[in-house]
Amino acid sequence: MTQAERDRLVALKKAKKKLITQKLAAEELGITERHVRRLLRELKRRATRWWRTDCGAALQPQDQCGH
């Protein structure tokens, strides 16, 4: 992950926690507010999918990953 990607993630997480507005996050990143909302949706989708899978693999039984 590059520094720019980390900076983008930090700004998006701040917006998600409502520490800054989506408008301010957009200004920091040089993108539109609409694109900030798209990125926040994508982060939420990926986080949900990660928690629903076991050990990062698609729906493996728990005994196969050592839990």
Image: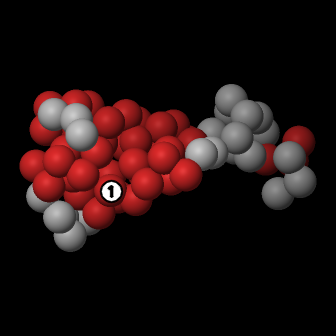
39 and 27: which one is in front?
A: 27
- Percent coordinates x, y for residue 36 in the rendering: 23, 39
How many discs appear?
1
Amino acid at pointer 1: Ala
Quadrant of the rendered image containing residue 2: top right
The quarter of the rendered structure image containing the N terminus is: top right
Residue 6 visible? The answer is yes
Left or right, residue 44 beside residue 32: right
55 and 61: which one is in front?
A: 55
- Percent coordinates x, y for residue 57 in the rendering: 73, 34
The quarter of the rendered structure image containing the C terminus is: bottom right
Residue to which mark 1 is pinned: 11
Q: Could you tell me which residue is drawn at 86 percent across and 46 percent down?
A: 65
Mark 1 residue crowding within 10 angstroms, few (<14) / some (14–19) / many (20+): many
| Relative vertical location of residue 14 with respect to residue 6 in this rendering, above or below | below
Q: Could you tell me which residue is drawn at 40 percent across and 59 percent down?
A: 10
